[in-house]
Structure formats: C-alpha cells, structure tokens
Image (cartoon, helix red, strand yellow):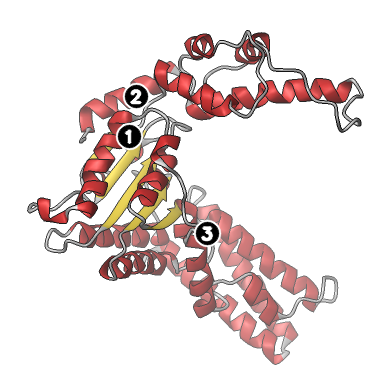
C-alpha cells in the first residue's frame, strides 16, 4: 500500500471512529478523533499538492472542524447524523456517500438539442452519424460491429457538448453526462464504484432496448498523462479502462457509447487514446458557420438596417461559437445599458434602440478570440498525428 493510500485509510478510520463516539455522546474523545482526521487530511494535501482530491480533503477537514466547534459550544447546533447526510463521506457514512455521489454523476434532464442547432461542424456530424446513428437505425448492416468510443477534441466553446447532446436526442438515448470532478467524487474511496455503477446503468439501459451514451467532459482531467499519481487516481483510471474495454468488446452488440470531450488532447494517456476508435476534431467555425451563428444569436434582437451579418462573420475570423454568442450578448447589453442610463427604463413602454453595425464592431474591437494561433496549430498537429474519422 502506498503512503497516500495509508493516509487515506487512516483518515477514514479516524473519522468513522469520531462519528461513532460523537453519536454516543463521548464529546472529548470524538473531538480528539476529529482532530486526528483533520491532521491526516491536511498532511495528504501537504505531501501531494497536485493531487486531484485535495479540494475534497480540505472540504472534509473544514466540515470536521465545524463539528468540533459545535461540540465545544462555539458553533451552530449541527447533529452528527445531519452532518453525515449533508456532508457525506466514506469516512462517516460509506453507503450514504455512494448513493449521493452517484446521483450527482447523472444528468437528470433529458437533452433536447436538434442537429440544426449544431451550426456548421459538418465533418464532425457526419462522423458521429456513421458511428452512432446509423448502427442504431440498422444494426443488421454492420457485421463487423461499430465504434463505441468517440473522442471529440478541439478549442473550447466550439460545440463538443452540443454534438453529444444532439446525437443523444437523435437516437433517443439515455444520456449520462459526467465530468472528472464528479467521477473523482467528494467522498473518498467511492470514485471507482461510481465508474462501475455508471457503466452498469448504461449497459442495463441498452439491454432493455434503449441506447445509452456516457458523455465525459474534460476527459484529460480523468485520464490525462500524470508524472505522479496517488491511490484514488490510479484506481479510478484502472476502473475506467476496464469498463471501457467491456463496452468496446466486439462480442457484444449493445448500443452503449462513450463520448469523451477534451480541450487538451495532447494530455491524454496513449492507452486511453487508442480505445477511442473515432477521434474527431471540433474546429473553430468557418465563414459560413459564423454567418449562421450570428443569424441564430440575433434572431430575437432588434437589428438596425445597416447590420451586415456577412461582414460581421468576416471580421470575426478566429472566434469560437461561444465567442460569437458573447459578442451578440455584449452588444445587446450595451444598448440596454444606454436605456437605463438615460432614465427611460422606468417607463415600461420604453425599448432600447435597434442594434447597429457600429455596436457590433465596437465590441469586436474590444475583444480578442479566446483561442490563440498557437493553440490552433497544436490542435492541427495532434489531429494529423491521431485523427480517426
């Protein structure tokens, strides 16, 4: 057992004993155990400053410190049972932690994103349809099976999440959206169980006849290259690798798909990269896509006659989809601000003036693209080295 794992185990033991003594009314001994749990957690943070669970450790330490203050009569009246429910932890209540942490993993709302809402990205949409939509519609046409691991990479704000949601809507799939922070969990020791349960739920949905998509955002945070790892991260990565291999198993023609999204594909570990049979670049919008985006984001705005969407698309080269949305929003906020500053906003009949071309140009002059040329070059180099459409 590594030093980090020993410390994790010790913190768990101290905290479990503290809660037991606390419930029995042994305040003095409970305080001592809470203090030992806090010291152990802070030692973990100090010894492993880059560990992904450090924020969790600090939160746990703060929770136990609050409980100590209450027991000493200087804090709010929080019962230990209430603390376990609101601040679950493997240290205090393993079964409750498992239940709550998994609930946090699952996106409750069904995505309702249509293909037409994903502006541009024709190459990416084509590749995803071939890998997911067509096999769901006619599995009999795929004797060699179909890809189940899809990696979407590219600059932030270009539509990776939208693509995943749109394909889930298209095939009426169960859509489970998670991120690295949720998987690692704020309850120690539950992360790998959450990963296993996540994939088990997806497989069960597919066995019942409903396709399932597991969407993992910021994939690099979970399975990126590490110079050093400690207990929890290693276990989660190994569990994810095992579950992914089970999904990709060609002997099972279940419609379960893993879609990973990352802004840093070069940070992914090679054993994981090769498990994504489709590796698709989601690029910055081209000229036609930018026109469509300006049209989409201004359709509910009052535009002056001089607004030329083609010219706006030309001068916004290098902007991402989210950048363009921000430009439209900022221009709109500017004219609304004028209305309030003029004192007319109190009149419910008063409306802001129409947005003019100069409003948009003024915002574009004040903003720079969120993606630098160097970043674009990095994406293109990685795409050339690892692309799989």
Return the x and y of residue 104 as percentages of the image width and height: 52, 63
Of residues 15 and 131, the one drawn nearer to the viewer in this rendering: 131
Tell me the CA gap for discs 3 and 1: 29 Å
Task: Specify few, some or many for label 3: CA neighbours under 10 Å numbering under 14, 14-19, or 20 or more.
Answer: many
* SS at badge 3: helix
- Is 214 situated left or right of 105 in this image? left
Residue 226 visible, this orientation: no
Classify 40 as above or below 365: below
Return the x and y of residue 330 as percentages of the image width and height: 67, 24
Which of the two discs, 3 and 1, labels the residue nearer the N terminus? Answer: 3
Quickly name the residue at label 2: 378
Quickly name the residue at label 1: 266
Residue located at (30% from left, 23% from top): 380
Location of residue 56 (image quadrant): bottom right
Disc count in the image? 3
Asked whether disc 3 touches disc 2, contact meaning CB atoms under 8 Å apart, the reply is no
Asked whether disc 1 touches disc 2, contact meaning CB atoms under 8 Å apart, the reply is yes
* SS at badge 1: helix
Quickly name the residue at label 3: 44
Residue 278 visible, this orientation: yes
Which of the two discs, 3 and 2, labels the residue nearer the N terminus? Answer: 3
Judge depth for marks 3 and 1 and give the one in front: 1
Judge depth for marks 3 and 2 and give the one in front: 2
Asked whether disc 3 touches disc 1, contact meaning CB atoms under 8 Å apart, the reply is no
Of residues 262 and 49, the one drawn nearer to the viewer in this rendering: 262
- Is 126 situated left or right of 5 in this image? left
């Amino acid at each position: 057992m590594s030093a980090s794992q020993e410390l994790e185990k010790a913190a768990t033991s101290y905290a479990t004993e503290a809660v037991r003594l606390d419930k029995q009314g042994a305040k003095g001994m409970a305080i001592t155990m809470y203090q030992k749990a806090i010291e152990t957690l802070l030692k973990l943070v100090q010894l492993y400053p880059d560990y992904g669970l450090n924020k969790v450790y600090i939160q746990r330490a703060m929770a136990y410190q609050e409980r100590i203050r209450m027991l000493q009569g200087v804090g709010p009246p929080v019962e230990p049972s209430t603390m376990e429910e609101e601040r679950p932890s493997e240290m205090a209540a393993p079964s409750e932690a498992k239940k709550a942490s998994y609930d946090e993993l699952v996106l409750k709302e069904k995505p309702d994103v249509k293909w037409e809402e994903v502006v541009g990205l024709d190459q990416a949409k084509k590749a995803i349809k071939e890998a997911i939509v067509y096999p769901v519609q006619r599995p009999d046409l795929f004797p060699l099976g179909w890809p189940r691991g899809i990696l979407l990479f590219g600059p932030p704000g270009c539509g990776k999440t939208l693509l995943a949601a749109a394909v889930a809507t298209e095939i009426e799939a169960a859509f489970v959206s998670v991120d690295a922070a949720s998987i690692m969990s704020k309850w120690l020791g539950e992360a790998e169980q959450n990963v296993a349960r996540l994939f088990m739920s997806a497989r069960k949905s597919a066995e019942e006849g409903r396709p399932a998509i597991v969407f993992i955002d910021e994939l690099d945070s979970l399975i990126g290259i590490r110079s050093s790892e400690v207990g929890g991260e290693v276990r989660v990565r190994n569990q994810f690798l095992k579950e992914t291999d089970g999904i990709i198993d060609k002997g099972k023609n279940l419609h379960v798909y893993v879609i990973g999204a990352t802004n840093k594909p070069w940070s992914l570990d090679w054993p994981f990269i090769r498990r994504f049979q489709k590796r698709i670049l989601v690029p910055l919008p081209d000229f036609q896509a930018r026109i469509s985006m300006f049209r989409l984001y201004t359709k509910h705005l009052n535009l002056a006659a001089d607004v030329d969407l083609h010219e706006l698309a030309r001068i916004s080269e290098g902007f991402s989809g989210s950048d363009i949305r921000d430009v439209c929003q900022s221009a709109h906020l500017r004219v609304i601000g004028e209305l309030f500053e003029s004192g007319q906003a109190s009149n419910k009949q008063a409306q802001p003036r129409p947005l003019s071309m100069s409003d948009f140009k003024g915002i574009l002059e004040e903003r720079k693209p969120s993606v630098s040329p160097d970043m674009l070059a990095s994406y293109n180099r990685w795409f050339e080295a690892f692309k799989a459409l």
